[in-house]
Image (cartoon, grey):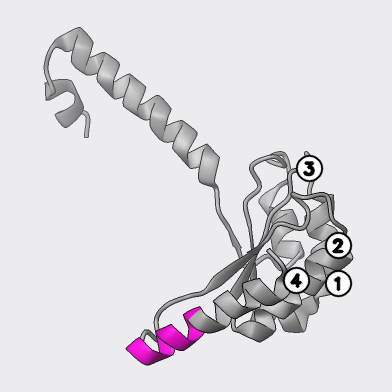
Amino acid sequence: APIGEFCGKIHACRDELHNIGASDFVLVARTESFITGKTVDEALRRADAYRLAGADAILCHSKRKDDADIRAFMAQWGPARAASCPVIIVPTTYYTTPTSAFREARIGAVIWANHNLRSSIAAMQTASGAIFDRESLAPLENSG
C-alpha cells in the first residue's frame, strides 16, 4: 500500500483507540520493504512514516537466509528511535542467527512464529500417537 494510505490507517486506528479509551493497546505497523525486494532506505522511510503516524512498534520482516537486512535497518534506525518505537522481527528464514545478535542490534521483540507452531505440531502428534497406542488419555494425564 502507498505510505500515505497506510499512515492514514494508522491515524484512524490511533484515533479510535483514543475514542474508546484503550490505553493498553499496542499498535504495530509492518513494513514489507525487504519482502518485496526494496532497499533499506525504503524500509526506513516507511518505518519512520509509520512511527510518526502513531505506530508503537515496527515489525520489520525479511526473507533472506541471514539477518543482513535487519542489521542494516537497525544500524540506521538508531538507539533513539529503537527506544521510542521498538522493532519486532520474525526470524523464520534466518533461524541460525543467535539471539545475542538480536540483543546487540537493539531488537525490541522476536516472534518465534513458525518454530513454536512446528514444535506444537510435533507434540500433538506424539500425544495423539500415545492416545492411539494406549487407547486412553491416562498416559498423558499421568505424565506430569
Label whose residue precedes the other's in the sequence (2 or 1) = 2
Residue 46 location (% of width, % of height):
75, 71
CA gap, disc 4 and disc 2: 10 Å
Which amino acid type is shown beneath numbered disc 2? Val
CA gap, disc 1 and disc 3: 19 Å
Label whose residue precedes the other's in the sequence (4 or 2) = 2
Residue 127 location (% of width, % of height):
28, 23
Instruction: Tell me which corner region of the image, top left, top right, bottom left or bottom right, holds residue 39.
Output: bottom right
Instruction: Tell me which corner region of the image, top left, top right, bottom left or bottom right, holds residue 124.
Output: top left
- Is 70 located above or below residue 125 in the figure? below
Residue at point 69%, 39% (across, down): 93
- Is 75 located above or below residue 16 in the figure? above
Which amino acid type is shown beneath numbered disc 4? Arg
Which amino acid type is shown beneath numbered disc 1? Gln
Q: Which mark is residue 46?
A: 4
Quadrant showing the N terminus? bottom right
Q: Is residue 55 visible?
A: no
Q: Is residue 70 magenta?
A: no
Q: Which mark is residue 40?
A: 2
Label whose residue precedes the other's in the sequence (3 or 2) = 2
- Is 68 located above or below residue 118 in the figure? below
Q: Nearer the viewer, mark 4 or mark 2?
A: 4
CA gap, disc 3 and disc 2: 13 Å
CA gap, disc 1 and disc 4: 13 Å
CA gap, disc 2 and disc 1: 9 Å
Judge the density around disc 2: few (<14), some (14-19), many (≥20) Cα neighbours within 10 Å: some
Magenta-colored span: 13-20
CA gap, disc 4 and disc 3: 19 Å
Q: Which mark is residue 64?
A: 3
